[in-house]
Image (cartoon, helix red, strand yellow):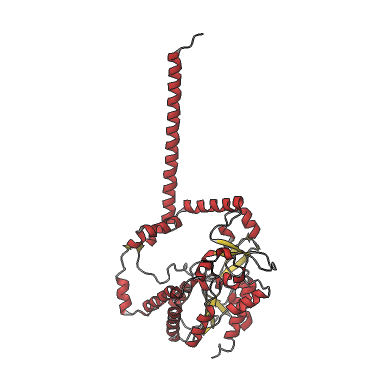
Amino acid sequence: MPLNPESNAHRLLDASQERRHAARRLVLALGLLWIALLAGDWTMRFFWFRWHETVYSRPLVTADRPLPAAKPSFSEMQLAPRVGGDLTALLGSPAARAKFGIERPGATITLDPEGFRMPIYPATQRFDVVVVGDSYMTDGVPLTNMISERIAAHLGVPVLNRAFMGRGPFQSLMLWIEQNWTRPPHPKWIVWGFVERDISGAAFAGYIYLIERHRGRVEVELKTAERLRPRVIWRALRPASLRVSLPNSSALAQLSRRAWARIQYDVFRELPADVFVMKDPEDRAPPMLGYRVALDAMYWPPAVRNLEQVVESIAYIQDYLDLIGVKLLVVPIPDKEQVFRDRIPQSVWKRGEPPPESIAPELVRRLQERGIAAISLYEPFTNAAAGGVQIFWPDDTHWHPAGIGLAARLIADELRGKLNM
């Protein structure tokens, strides 16, 4: 049968048009998918990451995110069993998490009417010691492992936990001041713990302003009145600022990082940049994970640490608490990377130099010279770690029950005999 050139040309033209239509549909589908992902990403940026709150100012609120309203009674919260800590959560790869993760049992913990982790106590209970701070000061499962309960066991007196997780070391102390300033009887001592990487002059200087606002001074009220209406923070819209804030508030970026972290380990056996492995030089203990943020803070220059400003800020807080007869016991908590500094690999040193020594002992010395009670955990922690005590969880930034127990004993020894002063 003879070929029909015209028919073949039509078939080729139809096939070419079909391919173009298919390509257009594919491009359209990919475009719609990209628009949907982009819209979802910006929705998450506003409703989950609250990115917009970094580019405009609102009226100041002393306790940035107040706790929920008090409940009429104690309640229970279930903690499920898990494997791994906050550092293994950064690894991305299930294989890496399985290698470094440590099992933790589940537990049932009680929350008091204010929402804090506490065993049940009578409403009329008086507490002469209160513990404030962030997760370091309220971590511990079961509740008998919390530092407040460990201190209570040593002293033989009840200790109230007013530390809470996820908001840094400042909010809980400020919240206690706001809620209890006019509600005697007041405790005799407040134990204030904060981790070393939170120690900087700028961070502590902000506390003076918060206290001034709480005192109701006119000049502070005027400053606050200037910010009653939201206004754009133009510096947050600079390219350099957006390069940081946009990826950190992007769900797609977070997913991409997790995917790349998994590829890094599964294919190249490399950990993500936020985490590094710390090995015992003498192989007496299994490897542990280190936190890059804590390592970076170890290299902060004196101008950033600004211990003089830190001391002045704490002294200002103590002067204010003296008005109601409350004393501070300041407890700087060394980071795991400081305690196990001999395990930090040279590959993560900055400029080829080992990280500087802990600033906690110097801070404690300066506070004591100002007449403020303070204890350093650095030397006891490093000595105990050298003897094989597991001060911190290997897969977490937080301290192990053994570290909590040692800190509680040191704090109790400091408070013993002072409660009746």
Q: In the rendering, at what x and y percent does residue 186 appear?
A: 49, 83
Residue 218: percent from the left, percent from the top? Answer: 31, 79
Asked if residue 157 can be seen in this view, the reply is: no
Which quadrant of the figure has residue 290? bottom right
Q: What residue do we see at 43% from left, 44% from top?
A: 34
> Which residue is outermost to the bottom?
421
Quadrant in the rendering for residue 91: bottom right
Which percent across, then down, holds residue 22?
45, 31
- Residue 261: x, y in percent? 55, 54
- The residue at the point 49 percent across, 70 percent down is 168
Res 58 visible: yes
Residue at the extreme front of the image, as rendered: 352
- Left or right of residue 299: residue 140: right
- Left-right relation of 223 to 328: left
Q: In this view, does 141 lie above or below 360?
A: above
Q: Which of 336 and 249 is in front in this view?
A: 336
Residue furthest out toward the top: 1
At horizontal 49% and vertical 54% (from top left) the residue drawn is 254
Look at the image and tell me in which quarter the C terminus lies: bottom right
* In the image, residue 79 above or below residue 192: above
Q: Residue at x 37, y 57 (%)?
A: 239
From the viewer's side, name the closer residue of 247 and 71: 247
Task: Between residue 364 and residue 71, name the one nearer to us.
Answer: 364
- In the depicted view, which residue is nearer to us: 61 or 197? 197
